[in-house]
Image (cartoon, coloured by chain):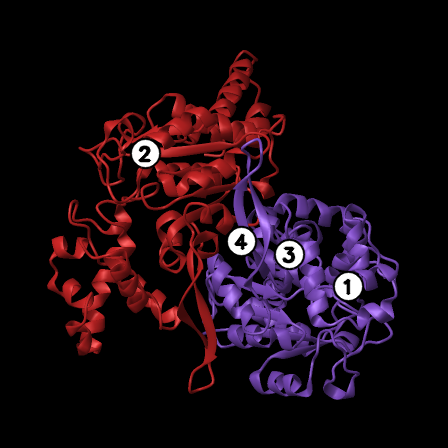
Chain colours: A red, B purple
Amino acid sequence: MSTSGSKDMSRRHVLGALAALPTLPILPVLFGASVARADDAPPPLPSWNDGPTKQAILDFIHATTDPSSKDFVPAEERIATFDQDGTLWVEQPIYTQIIYCLARVPVLAKANPHLAKVEPFRTVLTGDFEKIAKLSLRDFETIAVATLTGMDVEAFAAEVKAWIAEARDHRWKKLYTELTYQPMQEVLAFFRANGFKTFIVTGGGQDFVRVYSQRVYGIPPEQVVGSALGTKFGYDKAGRPFLTKEPKLLLNDDNAGKPEGIHLEIGRRPHAAFGNSTGDRQMLEYAKAGDGARLSMIVLHDDASREYAYGPARGLPDTRVGRFPQELDDEAKKGGWFIISMKDDWKRIFAFE
Amino acid sequence: MSTSGSKDMSRRHVLGALAALPTLPILPVLFGASVARADDAPPPLPSWNDGPTKQAILDFIHATTDPSSKDFVPAEERIATFDQDGTLWVEQPIYTQIIYCLARVPVLAKANPHLAKVEPFRTVLTGDFEKIAKLSLRDFETIAVATLTGMDVEAFAAEVKAWIAEARDHRWKKLYTELTYQPMQEVLAFFRANGFKTFIVTGGGQDFVRVYSQRVYGIPPEQVVGSALGTKFGYDKAGRPFLTKEPKLLLNDDNAGKPEGIHLEIGRRPHAAFGNSTGDRQMLEYAKAGDGARLSMIVLHDDASREYAYGPARGLPDTRVGRFPQELDDEAKKGGWFIISMKDDWKRIFAFE
């Protein structure tokens, strides 16, 4: 997948011209390797329906990677950023990291039995999802501090790694890491095959996502930007240095925090950005406002039967998680972003379908 | 340079065995490509004198990249971190970024003439280095805020880019970017040729170093971790989004801040770390404390004739910049770090020599 659609076409054009020549034994030597690769490689984005959205991706890659293009970007400068929840994997009915935090509460209560008598932990331990959903933002912060801070960063990573290897969602009964969108996995691979560095820029915790990003998305931990708590350097009893996760928010990587986080950890404006909700708005604006060819794309969840449908743009139901209001729809149209309709643009949603 | 010294030796052993065989036409086909590369490639680290320090680098690379080694590290996990000032380039008599800030004062004073009447700017504008050197830390903070904040991040990058392309140091009359240590450039290249991602982890400003890191060190901006100010997202009059550098210290990437910054922006413990002063101590401890083969190295500036000599370890003169006290020397020996003697380990210091 080292060629865009347009490049494929121009290569086919060259091949057509060669076919008109007398067959010379030298041809396979001259053209063999690259022609064989172009022919053997499957066309990019197989899970996408043909149409303006898919074409916009192919055109962007062509414009930025063809050396003769006025918008050519040197390989070392190619940066693309992707929101995670609702853009790369399912975010409904609630973010996976919140499910992780809730799942940690019984573990903590076993080690510290007094927690069972204290709110909001007592409510979480009932396992009554209706009641848990009614907890306040402050309650969720208390749960987050209890489950995400106070431990060695490497111990935290081990806890997440063990949980994410086994925990399954309620609707599909699949591992959460199987609920990534196949068409977006193809976009990640297509961008990387064309020299782009792909980054996750998530409102979720970067320490959480970094545990599985390489395995699940092919994105190394250092290419995950997310909400970040501070850490504190110290020594254990044996004198071994370690870092403790602190209850101090260093980066709230959502809304305006996304371009700020991109500047902090990447240091330059991305050429392409993908999101799905108001939390991605500023990142999409920031990417699109750069010089040359820029691509901002936003996933609209309009497929209730295969995944979920929520807006409230276009009369879709409103949700607490991942809002896509009408004004975002309007800004997308006005600003030249592309809206990815899960229903219309994606042949399939998951790899397991 | 895809092989370590030890691998070179084992390849030579194989070659020796092959030489004893009758010459067969098939040999170049079987062994041609890789043998040719091993023979053609110059040995790594040519500016290093042979000895235990150079050997430690070769051994570390061999241990972490030979698939049969018990300490083999998969390519995607290979991380090495390098301090900049005093480790990759000259830091005496004062950090280059401070010279930049001082050089910006006349530019600012031209735009805002009232500055010329206010301290510490008045003192800076005298150009009297003796007086400037006596300014307090608070004065330098005032100068830093005036010269490093309040502007668009991209405008700042353009200012640094223009300055660093022309500014020259006083001793060698060279561009600052020519004052990188050739032996360390070779270490960067050698690590990368062996699949390591190289990061700069600097006490200096990451926005400053990122401007030239790709060109000077082959390290892309997103692989520079440094002291970081917050930014603020906003829109200009045309509605174009941009980020303003704020006078809010987000990360003080020095001392314990180095491992904390590594966790924030890289997300895992490096396998190798290089530094030169007390500011690198915790980073070197942190890298060395990981499992498997780890390499912590510290540059001792003991070459007054070719560069500078300062400690105060080993009776070398003390300086305000880049201190290497006796206790650090002691910890290095006790902790299994390697001390790089510029005088003894490096054949030459600069590429222009």
The lab-note entry on whether marks 1 and 3 share a chain reads: yes
Looking at the picture, how far across and down is residue B320, in whole percent?
Answer: 74, 76
Question: Would you name the residue on which mark 2 appears?
Answer: A325
Going by the numbered disc 4, the residue's amino acid type is Leu
Label 4 marks a residue whose chain is: A
Q: Nearer the viewer, mark 3 or mark 4?
A: 4
- Chain letter of the residue beneath label 1 in the structure image: B
For numbered disc 4, what is the local secondary structure?
Answer: helix
| Three-letter amino acid code at the position of disc 1 | Glu
Which badge, 2 or 4, comes first in the chain's sequence? 4
- Secondary structure found at label 1: loop
Q: Earlier in the sequence, mark 1 or mark 3?
A: 3
Residue wearing tag 4? A264
Foreground disc of the pair 4, 1: 1
In-front residue for pair B273/B69: B273
Is disc 4 surrounded by few (<14), some (14 to 19) or many (20+) residues within 10 Å? many
In the rendering, at what x and y percent does residue B213 appear?
A: 66, 53
Q: Specify the subunit that label 3 lies on.
A: B
User: Which residue does the numbered mark 3 point to in the structure image?
Assistant: B38
Q: Amino acid at mark 2?
A: Pro
Q: Chain of mark 2?
A: A
Are circles 1 and 2 on residues that touch, CB within 8 Å? no
Q: Which-is-in-front pick, marks 2 and 4?
A: 2
In the image, taking residue A164 as reference, residue B232 lies left or right, namely right
- At label 3, which amino acid type do we have? Ala
Can you identify the residue that label 1 sits on? B119
